[in-house]
Amino acid sequence: MKTRFFLFALPALLICASAMAETSYQPFVLASVNETGLDQQSAITADALEAAGFEIAGQYSPLENTRVMVVTSDELKNLAAQSDRGGYGAGQRVSISERDGKTEVAFINPLYIQYAYRMDADLQSIHDQLSGALGNQQAFGANKKMTPKKLAKYHYKPMMPYFDDPLKLGSFDSHEAAIAAVEEGLAVEGDALSQVYRIDIPGKEQTVFGVGMKAASDDDEDIDEAHQLAIVDFEGFSKVAYFPYEIIVDGADVEALPMKFRMAVHFPDLPMMGSHSFIKLSSSPGATRDAFEKLVDSE
């Protein structure tokens, strides 16, 4: 009898295990849509985040009628510290976007980031805290099935970079010297790059900076946030929480994720060709790399 029960139950168990293995994630979560104005909703959002135990590491407006807040917490920083390059996930991006008389609140999906950035930590608690504080109407941003396995080895096309193919921007004599170089570069007046936040990862020499990218001249168009989002964020709910961009100081080295990976993993449905496609941003990855290298020029 026991043998018969086991044989009967085995297919169901295999189906259940298969379903769990095929769980998929989307890069963004829509928290709410309401008629509250941008400034008021931003204040409400900040209060809700702080009441939930988050610290606002920095905020800015990548586009007109938008606000992006980057939040962290002791728990999140400790979770990030469990991974070699966990600093990329130490700041969670929250956006408030006003358009067509409605205000959308959304956040980057911590579980998506967990797998895409190969974090050795479970960010379910961070996902639940953000959802509890802000709401959770639906996940969005990917029609493709983005499973943990696919995210962990994600690259857009053959010959395109993976998560572990970072841009190596510079090396210095010490962690402190590398941090000083990044902060000095981001403090330069009148250029396209600015510091949005800084988060230090506990227990290790790792610091992540959030970088705003606004064109200061026509020469900066390729790295400009508005220019990029006009091409990739053209339908559905706002995905402005793609920004700001991260630069990491790891020990005495400075690195960033290549745009060919970072943009692609946040916008996995975008085609290679067409009016809204990666080909329209073909000059942006190289321009981003050049701007970041110039920022931390160690010579």
Image: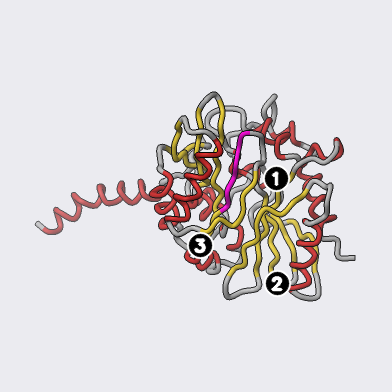
Asked if residue 142 lies left or right of residue 198, the reply is left
Q: Which residue is mark 2?
A: 251
Q: Earlier in the sequence, mark 3 or mark 1?
A: 3
Q: Furthest residue to the left?
A: 1
Residue 278: % across, % down: 70, 35
Which residues lie in the magenta part?
65-70
Which element type, helix, strand or loop, lies under badge 2?
loop
Compute the Cα span from label 2 to label 1: 25 Å
Three-letter amino acid code at the position of disc 1: Lys
Residue 123: % across, % down: 46, 58
Residue 238, quarter of picture: top right
Q: Earlier in the sequence, mark 3 or mark 2?
A: 3
In the picture, the quarter occupied by the C terminus is bottom right
Q: Which residue is mark 3?
A: 73
Which element type, helix, strand or loop, lies under badge 3?
loop
Three-letter amino acid code at the position of disc 2: Gly
At 20% across and 52% down in the image, what residue appears? Answer: 7
Asked if residue 260 lies left or right of residue 295, the reply is left
Q: Furthest residue to the right?
A: 299
Which element type, helix, strand or loop, lies under badge 1?
helix
Q: Which numbered disc, 2 or 1, marks the residue closer to the eye?
A: 2
Q: Which residue is mark 1?
A: 260
Q: Nearer the viewer, residue 88 or 41?
A: 41
